[in-house]
């Protein structure tokens, strides 16, 4: 049976690229924090945001545009907003 083609979405791809850049920037900012205790706290809090983006990119790569990838993108947006409100960089 032939494999079903995955559905692509240019807007989602742009959002994923932007989120990946933002994750890299925030990670770099966190690593610039001098105090190890604070740095560890930020890294722990940011871990869920980062893993959501990794899962989103992996899911989109395998399945393309679908309800699950839309949900992961929505979840990322919510998590990054909460992180930025709670933690000051």
Image: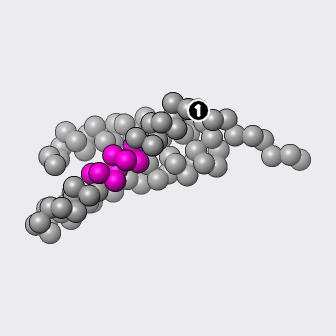
Q: Residues within 10 Å of mark 1 (few under 14, many from 20)?
A: few
Judge whether 66 appears above or below 48 on screen. above
The x, y position of residue 81, in whole percent, is 28, 37
Q: Residue at x 14, y 69 (%)?
A: 36
Spot occupied by residue 59 in the image (x, y as percentages of width and height): 57, 48
Q: Residue at x 33, y 42 (%)?
A: 79
Residue 83 quadrant: top left
Residue 76 position in % (x across, y down): 39, 41
The dominant secondary structure in magenta is: helix
Of residues 11 and 46, the one nearer the viewer is 11
Q: Is residue 67 left or right of residue 71?
A: right
Residue drawn at (37%, 53%) of the image = 50
Q: Please name the residue shown 63% across and 41% down the image.
A: 64
Magenta residues? 19-26
Find the residue positioned furthest to the left. Answer: 35
In the picture shown, does residue 38 fall above or below 71? Answer: below
**Closer to the camera in the image, 80 or 29:** 29
Evaluate whether residue 71 shows in this view: no
The relative height of residue 54 versus residue 35 in the rendered view (above or below) is above
Relative image position of residue 60 (x, y in whole percent)? 58, 44
When asked about the image quadrant of residue 78, the answer is top left
Task: Name the colour scheme.
Answer: one colour
Query: Which residue in the protein does label 1 denote?
Result: 9
Tally of numbered tags? 1
Whether the magenta-drawn stretch holds residue 89 is answered as: no
């Amino acid at each position: 049976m032939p494999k079903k083609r995955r559905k692509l979405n240019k807007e989602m791809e742009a959002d994923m690229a932007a989120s990946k850049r933002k994750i890299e920037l925030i990670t770099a900012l966190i690593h610039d924090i001098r105090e190890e205790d604070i740095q560890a706290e930020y890294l722990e809090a940011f871990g869920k945001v980062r893993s959501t983006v990794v899962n989103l990119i992996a899911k989109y790569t395998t399945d393309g545009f679908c309800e699950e990838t839309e949900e992961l993108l929505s979840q990322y947006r919510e998590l990054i907003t909460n992180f930025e409100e709670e933690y000051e960089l």
